[in-house]
Image (spheres, rainbow, N blue to C red):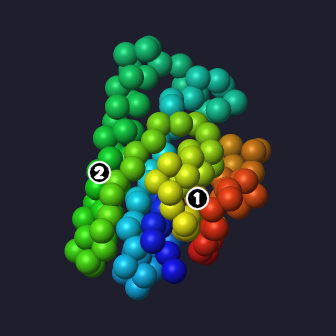
Amino acid sequence: MFQRILVATDDSELSRKAIQAAIGLASTHKAELYVLHVVPRYPTAYFEGAVVLAPDDVARVEKQWSEAGQQLVDGITREAQAAGVTAKSLLVHSDAVAEAVIAAARKQECDLIVMASHGRRGMQRVLLGSETQHVLTHSSTPVLVLR
């Protein structure tokens, strides 16, 4: 039924459940698994939680976030491969998390997106709403939400 499954992770405990479910689904359906992590830019506005840093420090922080994100998706990809699933790592840099998830699913021609019901987005999540909710309402690809 499914040939390409995208699982989005923010490294929260809840997203680990989504990862396990996605690996299980991919194994059952002999589907390819795409493991996605979206890396945000360093916030620059006070209301985004910014602490004023020099441009070099911002670049260093963003590089650390990118490296940590790559390690995360690579680790999950290895975990899926150990379970016999063909898996690929995807790392996207964007502040528009939901749009990045939808675009990645479209680009990889996925027929299912697997996500946790909510992740760690702090005050921004309270003010702007859930990224998962946004994916649910804007994606043409079916979405499996786990809690």
* Occupied quadrant, residue 50: top right
**Residue position for label 1:** 119
Left or right position of 67 against 144: left
Dot 2 amino acid type = Gln
Dot 1 amino acid type = Gly
* Occupied quadrant, residue 140: bottom right
Left or right position of 54 against 89: right
Left or right position of 18 against 124: left
The residue at the point 29 percent across, 51 percent down is: 71
Q: Quadrant of the C terminus?
A: bottom right
Q: Which mark is residue 71?
A: 2
N-term mark: 1 or 2 = 2
Q: Position of residue 27 (x, y in %)?
A: 37, 81
Front-lying residue, 107 or 10: 107
Disc 1 crowd, CA 10 A, few/some/many (<14, 14-19, 20+): some
Q: CA distance from mark 1 to mark 2?
A: 19 Å
Q: Secondary structure at mark 2?
A: helix
The residue at the point 42 percent across, 82 percent down is: 29
Q: Position of residue 9 (x, y in %)?
A: 48, 58
